[in-house]
Image (cartoon, rainbow, N blue to C red):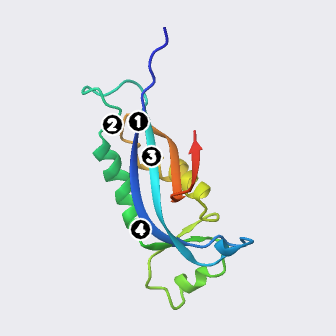
Amino acid sequence: MNSPTFSCTRKIHFCAGHRVFQHESKCGNVHGHEYMIEISARPKSDLDSLGRVIDFSEIKAKVETWIDENWDHGMLLNSQDPIRSLWFKGILKDHKFYVLPYNPTAENIAHYLLTEICPVLFADTNVEVFQITCHETPKCRATVTL
């Protein structure tokens, strides 16, 4: 008989603006979304002494705090997008922004959280974040899984 596999998922909401640099349609314009992120974690070994992967509040404390500080109510920008100069040294320099190494699509937002941010945030835990789903709208989402 196979052993069960455990995971847990926490949802986090935030609002941010973005632009998909060189997009062929309206997403090439600056606009915003109310994002919903699903963070799924699994234990590196066993469940904790209380029978959990991790307390849901610990996921919230780590990921939601990072998102609040870096992305919430800010502008997500591609490092190659020429409009980033408006934020770096231009008229919007006092407004919150975050530069990604690629376009801030739902796929890339999920990928960035999964591969760059969560490994650092959860380094001191017995869990591995293995999947991120980024809902850009109620109808559209992208998932990245390790």
Label whose residue precedes the other's in the sequence (4 or 3): 3
Amino acid type, mark 3: Ile
Image quadrant occupied by the C terminus: top right
Which residue in the protein does label 1 denote? 127
Label whose residue precedes the other's in the sequence (2 or 3): 3
Query: For the residues carrying marks 2 and 3, which lies nearer the camera in this image?
Result: 3
Label whose residue precedes the other's in the sequence (1 or 4): 4
Image quarter of residue 79: bottom right
Residue 25 versus residue 111 in the image, above or below: below
Label whose residue precedes the other's in the sequence (3 or 1): 3
Helix, strand or loop at label 1? It is: strand
Mark pair 4, 2: CA separation: 24 Å
Q: Which residue is drawn at 30% across and 45% down?
A: 58
Helix, strand or loop at label 3? It is: strand
Other-residue count near label 1 (Cα within 10 Å), few / some / many at <14 / 14–19 / ≥20 = many
Which residue in the protein does label 3 denote? 39
For this orientation, the residue located farthest to the front is 139
